[in-house]
Structures are given as C-alpha cells and as structure tokens.
Image: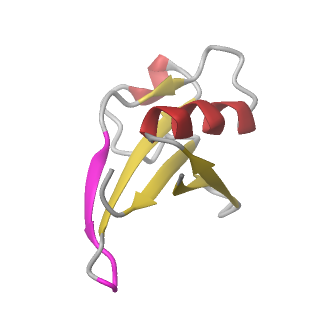
Amino acid sequence: MKEYYLERNGSGAGTDILAHDDQDAIERALLILRDDGYMVVADQWDDCGLNDEEEPVKRILIWWCEEDSRNDSGANSLAQLTTIGRA
C-alpha cells in the first residue's frame, strides 16, 4: 500500500488515503469527494519536484466539470491528490 493525500482547494482540508496504486488512489479520492460520475481528473500526474527529504512528489488535479478544467493549472480545481516517492 502507498500513501496519498487528498487536499480540497480553498479549504485546506485534507484526507490521507492508502491505496494499492495511482488508479486505486484516484478511485478512492472520487468516492471521498462523492463523485456522481461528472468530475474530471487530469490525464497525467504532475511532477512537483522534491520535498525537504529529497523524495519526489507528484500530484493529479480533480475538477467538478470539463469547463473548469480547460486551460487550468489548478486554480479552478476542486482538489488535488498528491503522493511522495516512486510508484
């Protein structure tokens, strides 16, 4: 199992998620966000560099709808899912 962190944009509220892999983490995040099947998930993970312990960090963004996701670098996103370390 690998650790992920789901952070809701704007509120700073977050949830720790344990998942088998990236896809499992995305599915669990959507359940937590109460997805009705309309949320949009970015098509790839973003490399966010290294944390203070020199471990790689990556994130994927989640939006309410396709319109919010167009040409958006994260300001309009509902949440982001991050993880530390390699897959």
User: Depth check: 86 or 61 in front?
Assistant: 86
User: Depth check: 78 or 85 in front?
Assistant: 85
Give percent across and percent down for residue 17.
63, 52
Identify the magenta region.
45-53
Instruction: Give me the residue at 46% from left, 28% from top.
Output: 41
Q: Residue furthest top?
A: 37
Residue 8 at least partly seen: no
Q: Where is 40 relative to 10, above or below?
A: above
Residue 65 at least partly seen: yes
How many circles with numbers are drawn on the protein? Answer: 0
Lateral position of residue 33 relative to residue 27, left or right = right
Q: Where is 36 relative to 6, above or below?
A: above
* Magenta segment includes 33: no
Picture quarter containing residue 71? Answer: top left
Q: Where is 49 relative to 63, above or below?
A: below
Give percent across and percent down for residue 53.
33, 85
Instruction: Give me the residue at 73% from left, 38% from top.
Output: 32
User: Depth check: 25 or 36 in front?
Assistant: 25
Instruction: Give me the residue at 39% from left, 51% from top.
Output: 59
Picture quarter containing residue 56? Answer: bottom left
Instruction: Give me the residue at 62% from left, 56% from top.
Output: 10
User: Depth check: 32 or 86 in front?
Assistant: 86
Colouring: secondary structure
Give percent across and percent down for residue 13.
70, 61
Lateral position of residue 1 relative to residue 49, left or right = right
